[in-house]
Amino acid sequence: MRRVSIKKPQMTDADVARVNAIDALFDAIDKNGDGKVSKRELKAALKASDHEVASRLGLKRVKDVDAWMKSADVDGDGAIDRLEFHAKVERVAPL
C-alpha cells in the first residue's frame, strides 16, 4: 500500500490575523482563565459588550446562547474549549 502525503498550505498573514482575533476574543470571554468558556462567561460578555461580541459570534440575542453553546460543545462537558470555540466561530461568523 502506498502512503500519500498531504501537504497543508502555509497560513497567510490574513489567516494568522484571523486566528489571533479569535484567540483574543476567547481570552476576553474566558474571565477565570481556565481555558474554557462557560455559559455564564459568555452571557456576561454579551451583556457587557453592547452587541459587539454577539455579532462576532453570530449571535442575535442573549437567549440564543444555549443553542450556540450546545452546538459548539463537541465533547459535551458543558463548556467551550479553545478548539471548539475556533471551530464554531469559523462556521458561524468568520472574522
Image: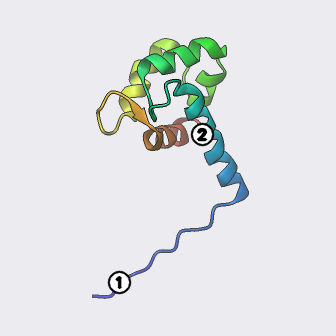
How many neighbours does mark 1 have within 10 angstroms: few (below 14), some (14-19), or many (20 or more)? few
Q: Is residue 2 visible?
A: yes
Query: Disc 2 vs disc 1: Cβ atoms closer than 8 Å?
Result: no
For disc 2, the neighbor class at 10 Å (few under 14, some 14 to 19, many from 20) is many
Q: CA distance from mark 2 to mark 1?
A: 35 Å
Q: Dividing the image into 4 quarters, which one contains the C terminus?
A: top right
Q: Which residue ends up furthest to the right in the rendered image? A: 13
Q: Residue at the spot x=72%, y=56% of the render?
A: 13
- Mark 2 vs mark 1, foreground winner is 2
* SS category of the residue bearing label 2: helix
Percent coordinates x, y for residue 53 in the rendering: 62, 24
The residue sitting at 53% across, 37% down in the picture is 89
Q: x%, y% of residue 21?
A: 65, 40
User: Can residue 95 be seen from the camera position used here?
Assistant: no
In the rendered image, the quadrant that contains the N terminus is bottom left
- Which residue is identified by label 2? 22
* In this rendering, position of residue 41 left or right of residue 12: left
